[in-house]
Image (cartoon, grey):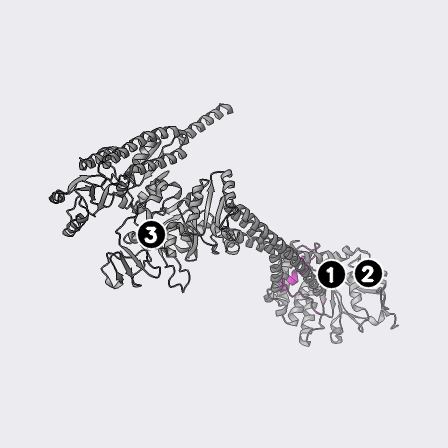
Amino acid sequence: MIEIEALEFHYPQGEFHLSIPRMSVAQGEKVAVIGPSGSGKTTLLNLIAGISCPQQGTVKVAGQTVSSFSDAGRRDFRITNLGFVFQDFELLDYLNVLDNILHPYRITRALKLTQQVQQRAIDLSNGLEIGDKLKRFSGELSQGEKQRAAICRALLPQPRIILADEATGNLDPRNKGRILDLLFENVESHGASLLAVTHDHELLPRFDRVIDFLEFRTGAAA
Amino acid sequence: MINSLYIAWRYLVFNKVRSATLIACITLIAFLPMALQLILEESQQLLQSRANSTPLLLGARGSALDLVMNSLYFDDEVPEIISMQAADEITDTGLAYVIPLYIRFQARNKPIVGTSIDYFDFRNLQIAQGRMLAVLGESVIGAGVAEEYGLAPGDSIVSSPDTLFDLAGAYPLKMTVAGILERSHTPDDQAVFVDLKTAWVIEGLGHGHEDLSRTRDSSVILNRSEDSVTANAKLFQYTEITEENMEGFHFHGDASIYPLTALLAIPDDAKAATLLRGRYLENQQYHIVRPTEVIQGLMENIFRIKRVIDAVIAIVGLATVLAIALVFSLSVRLRQRELTTIFKLGCSRMTAVKLIAAEIVIIVLAAGIICAGLLYIVDANVETLVRMFILN
Amino acid sequence: MNAKFWQIIVSILLVVSFTASADEKLSVYAVNYPLAYFAERIGGSSVNVVLPVPADIDPAFWEPDASVIAEFQQADLILLNGAGYAKWLKHASLPRRKLVNTSAAFQRDYISVEQTVTHQHGPGGDHSHAGTAFTTWLDFNQARMQAKAILSVLENQRPRHADTFIQNYTLLEKDLVSLDQTLSAIVAQDSNKPFIASHPVYQYLARRYNINMKSVMWEPEIMPQQNQWDALQQLLATHSAGWMIWEGQPDKQSATRLEELDINSLVFSPCANTPEEGDFISVMKNNIREIEKAFR
């Protein structure tokens, strides 16, 4: 599903340098990425999502060389093929839960908001146990409910890959496990791959594979 | 674009206070100059048409504007008083016929216009209900007065005392409403018309009482001699003229010294008008004015002031626009995180622009609709507003 | 039917309507019969003269109702006598523009009425009601001036017919001058001859024709009361009149009793209202014949 070859990336300013000779994630695989802060885990997600472009090497997602797409191409690809789950949920406070879930469909022409999609959103929210809170605003939700809403948003376009950046970072221990369970359940049922950046070592055993970012970090640390 | 509008709408609804404030600012900035323009245009039309239909006005030398405003628009600034003699003088010239005016008193906050019934022909006022004035003590009221106070022919209206403490002054007079005029969309709609003599009765120049030579009530008699009877203050001075007591109503003294506020002078032709004006050019006591000229001067002044107000509004408007622009730019900064998120999700930078643009469109549209609504209300009530702000 | 045809039709209609309106009769309302008579004599077919006073009422004291006042308001001209005639004018609302004070030319010569009880009250001080004698037309010279005033206003209103009005006026003037001269000549025979007027309505007559006249306040159809007879006696002491002038045929008893006092009666009708028979000139001629009786 994800294949990275000979990737070299650095930011215009600063000494940060990321070098990944090879990395892959198979379809349906649930991979955790760990590493110290500043090691470039989020950068990796950005490169896979096509938010950033490597100076060298290729990033292939679902068989497509995303790194060679145009800016518009990468955006359209991203919104139709990838789902993001953020540490801080990143829900919009002025939209209710349903509108938040449907939001990706309203910000791009690549996705069409239809009745079916709306129904799917309702079904997803029911599946993630927030079906009764669709009219509420994010300010009225608990942390766990917020993350579930965010997961619904990520899953609604039926992406092939879910990129989770510290998805459980702001949750209490009881919710962490619960959220991860729900995430795994839905990822499996959709046949999607999951690449999750996490600091939480307790959760690692639940993943299929763990990638330690220390392998790829070069530059000042090396 | 629909989606952007939807999202923008949600954002505005969620931030009600901010949205309402922005809409209010834009509405005000748009509404004020337009409303002002509307009111001034209407007032110009109202004032000018009335002035154009009034050839000449004679009054005591002094403020021409006060004279015109009181005589044509029944403003409560009473000009200096002149006498009936002025009417006779003009009539004697043969150059014009006159319509005397005595506009000094009020009845229930409406001006009482004492005049001769030629006034109604001159102003082309028709009776809608009842009939024209016939005798002393009757009134004919404008359509606006009838509507406001629910008056019909046969009802009464009482004149207000000049001052609360004027114990020896004018007595309130209860006047019968003989008729109601058709609506004319002029200040005549808001006036109470009486015969000049009735106005003089209100002034206290005419009054009625029992015939002292025949009275049987000796307690009202102070002194009686062969050819003179003096009454004391017990003698009741009527406040209502009825069929029974009308005969007793009378006026003392020579009518030529009785007061007027102005004379409408309608000359036979332009030459007569010029001759008449010429005769009063050097007159120390009176002057003749052309209402058209006076109103033109007034409107020029008003519009001059309006231009200043417009300039001020423009500056304030510019400041408001800048402030609004600042609000939006701050808003964008505040929403940087949201914009980053949706960019990460896969939307283009254009989308962010579209979202902000959609907000602006909705706000401006809302302000526009409210502004249009307010202007519609102003337009519907412009006559009343002109009367409130310009005439009074 | 082409445009030119319709243009001609419209022009004809306009001319006809213009002519018709220009020749429309002037509606003239008068406050008493003498003025109505003069207006009819002078105006002829150009005027429609109305005297709405009922025949049996003295126009000076008549009180019209609102509907009659409205008729006055609608008239083209309202002929007023002046000299405070009539009472109802003090309280009525009439259009100034249409009012014609027929005695304006001699208003300085109005006669004030004596022997009126004045009254005063309040802080204003002494007032008297300026009583003015109003039977101005009994001085036939004044009557002529009143007729002249009517001529003047009719000429203004209908200049096209001015010539006709002047012709008519000239004939009327001749009649009035004749009355004036005849009566002057009669009275000149004995200008000191004392008369008593039964009612104070002959002031102008007395002044113009130098008639030595004093007045009481009697009504022709009512037998005077004793105090009135007493007052007459007192008057006769200083003014030994042999004739009483009545406005109308006196009560037989009054006449008889007067004869006992060596006072004869003659009728000089002021003719303020429409006479039962004849017209103003014939009534005045009759009046003169009556007065002539006293000078035979």
Up-down relation of residue B253 to residue A37 (above or below): above
Mark 2 belongs to which amino acid?
A: Cys
Q: Chain of mark 1?
A: B
- Name the secondary structure under disc 2: loop
CA gap, disc 1 and disc 2: 15 Å
Percent coordinates x, y for residue C147 in the rendering: 33, 35
Q: Chain of mark 3?
A: B
Q: Does residue A7 appear left or right of residue B235 in this picture? A: right
Q: Does residue B165 appear left or right of residue B216 in this picture? A: right
Magenta residues, dominant SS class: loop
Mark 1 belongs to which amino acid?
A: Phe
CA gap, disc 1 and disc 3: 79 Å
Residue beneath disc 3: B154
Residue beneath disc 1: B343
Q: Chain of mark 2?
A: A
Q: Nearer the viewer, mark 2 or mark 3?
A: 3
